[in-house]
Image: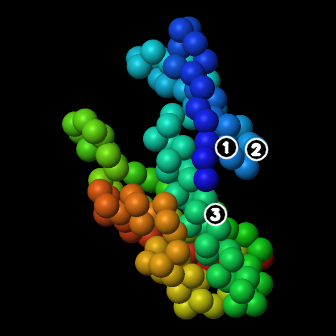
Amino acid sequence: MECTIDWGGPEGMLFVARTGSGHVATMDGAPEGGGNNLAPRPMEMLLTGAGGCAAYDVVLILKRGRHAVKGCQVKVTAERAQTDPKVFTQIHFSFVVTGDNLPQAAVERAVKLSHEKYCSATAMLGATAQITHSVSISGA
């Protein structure tokens, strides 16, 4: 896996990332940090990736269990250390999974498996952050 990140130039702190799979993502900083607020912050992208990784796992586990999952949303909230490096110290994943007659136990199991076994992003972030999660199920 690889990616290339290019700085947009001296007018700010815009960066363009090109992934090995051929996709493009942009990142920028806040104006007080020299950016122009044109794109998500790099640390927001890190949280976004972790949320996507966990949601991907949950959907895949439920689908493999032949559950009628129709939607999965995860809201990720985090706190960071006050001093550099300002690592994440607490991260909470709040899942809302939608489907027909989804058993609570199956959804909770999928979230637990993602957290404890499959999600490489949360495994890495867990080195500095306490990671918690909550689950809510909604009918389709």
Q: Secondary structure at mark 3?
A: strand
Q: Residue at x 74, y 43 (%)?
A: 23
In the image, what residue occupies the spot 68% across and 77% down?
Answer: 60
Of circles 1 and 3, the one toward us is 1
Along the viewing direction, whichever of 10 and 88 lies nearer the viewer: 10
Q: Is residue 19 above or below residue 94?
A: above
> What x and y, as percent, mark residue 28?
55, 26
Residue 19: image tag: 1
Q: How many marks?
A: 3
Q: Secondary structure at mark 1?
A: strand
Residue 80 sits in quarter: top left
Q: Is residue 90 left or right of residue 94?
A: left
What secondary structure is found at the residue carrying circle 2? loop
Q: CA distance from mark 2 to mark 1?
A: 5 Å
Of marks 2 and 3, the one in the foreground:
2
Residue furthest toward the top?
A: 11
Query: Where is residue 75 drawn, in percent x and y?
Result: 54, 57
The structure residue drawn at horizontal position 40% and vertical position 51%, both measured from the top left corner, is: 78
| Residue occupied by mark 2 | 22
**Of the residues under marks 2 and 3, which one precedes in the sequence?**
2
User: Which dot marks residue 73?
Assistant: 3
Residue 88: percent from the left, percent from the top? 34, 50
